[in-house]
Image (cartoon, rainbow, N blue to C red):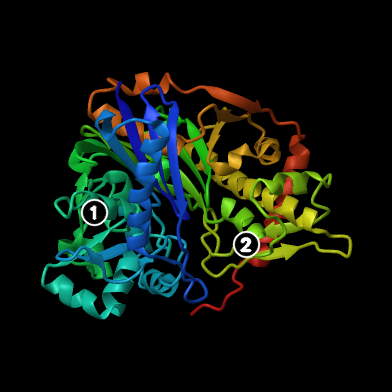
Amino acid sequence: MAFLLAIDQGTTSSRAIVFATDGRVCGIGQREFTQYFPKPGWVEHDAREIWASQRAVIDEALAKANIPAAQIAAIGITNQRETTVAWDARTGEPIANAIVWQDRRTAGHCDALRAAGHAQTFQRKTGLLLDAYFSGTKLGWLLKNIPAAQKLASEGHLRFGTIDSWLIWKMTHGRVHTTDASNASRTLLFNIHTGDWDEELLALLEIPRSVLPKISASSEIVGYFDLNGAQIPIAGIAGDQQSALFGQGCHAPGMAKNTYGTGCFMLMNTGNVAVPSKSNLLTTTAWKIDRATDYALEGSVFMGGAVVQWLRDGLQIIESAPQVETLAASVPDAGGVMLVPAFAGLGAPHWDSYARGTILGLTRGSTKAHIARAALEAIAFQSAEVLIAMEADSGITLKELRVDGGATSNNLLLQFQADLLGVPVVRPKITETTALGAAYLAGLAVGIYKTKAEIASHWQRDRTFEPAMSRDEAQARMAKWAKAVARAKGWEEVE
């Protein structure tokens, strides 16, 4: 019997999941790794620790599935997307810590590029907004600020990659330097219309083409990993949100999903049309299979489940993430408290690098339960803003929203989300859809699945949350949220 291995390298933990070919989870390994915050607004990871933790959880997942490596038919990789790694090709050693997608250090560089009139060029070619979120300016920062970077680049020894490229380099002992179209489309360097790195954008960001990986399809064999003596094809690659869209079976235009992970990421499939956004959303490559590219509209919310992590680790008002639902449910509502979790600025549809986290509406009667409830509601408010923009851009009225990610175990959150949106919110039986998408892409490449329709047939719903709030009340709540967001904007001084 064949199995599929998904490597799911996230922002706060490395995971590996063994799937049966019908999508059932057979074994999971997971390890958290260190988050570094060297300066306000800076977020870093140690790429070596990421690789070590990822390698360890692969063995954990195999042990829990109780299968030998030889029974793995293919490996799919899905990853935190814009996080930027640069390393020496000769040694395979990073030249600095990885700069994480949440990092805001290049906000000033983005402002300067905008002031010079380049924003439209970037948006037209990449589908992205000129923001510190994406990899291009992070790579530019490394090239300018790490002493060894320029010398290595000029000698042809520097390699850049998002986390997928870094893992593949390590898995193949430096034989393969590649990424897929979905990850490439998050760099500010990739032209989503031509499907290649763009010379004009490379020049604007002063990035030498020699450091960039080859661009592969999302479903093809790119190399082999020696897994405990078995040569396993690496056959699927997709950024985590595109992978979740694929794993949710959202293969037709107009289907949408929201992932509640560290951030919240809503994607709507737009088929073979790259729909330009007028609402500050992103147009992104969903996946490339064979020679066909599918696109998506995306709204990125920087702080989703990370808000709950902050309640646990920062405020210490809960001991574990699942406790937030019990605490929030102990009060009938948030008691007028609003929490805007702009800890790393605001993403879609605001894109304000200088916004900061804000709690409003506090009174002497406010308790930690009200703050916990306001935190959960904030996750839903941010996602609702994105969907409103998405419907405006696409002209499509959503019929249902498929959801996944760690926070979807929280029924209070999903019910409030359905109430705000006014459409059913559907949680699938298998919520590991990010990893599942990568496994499916790998299985498609090696012939375990013949078509996308066969993959979509495995999707099953667990529970549907029907909206129970009047539209008038939902609109009033959204208006109050907009007022709170306005208070949080532009808090930090522009550099």
Asked whether, in this view, residue 307 is left or right of residue 448, the answer is right
The residue that appears at 29% across and 47% down in the rendered structure is: 192
Q: Is residue 106 visible?
A: yes
Q: Is residue 127 visible?
A: no
Q: Quarter of the image containing the N terminus?
A: top left
Q: Earlier in the sequence, mark 1 or mark 2?
A: 1
What residue did someone put label 2 on? Answer: 313
What residue did someone put label 1 on? Answer: 170
Q: Quadrant of residue 446?
A: top left
Q: Secondary structure at mark 2?
A: helix
* Residue kind at label 1, given as amino acid type: Lys
Q: Secondary structure at mark 1?
A: helix
- Are circles 1 and 2 on residues that touch, CB within 8 Å? no
* Mark 1 neighbour class, 10 Å CA radius: few under 14, some 14 to 19, many 20 or more: some
- In front of the other: 470 or 463: 463
Asked whether, in this view, residue 437 is left or right of residue 221, the answer is right
* Residue kind at label 2, given as amino acid type: Asp
Q: How many labels were placed on the picture?
A: 2
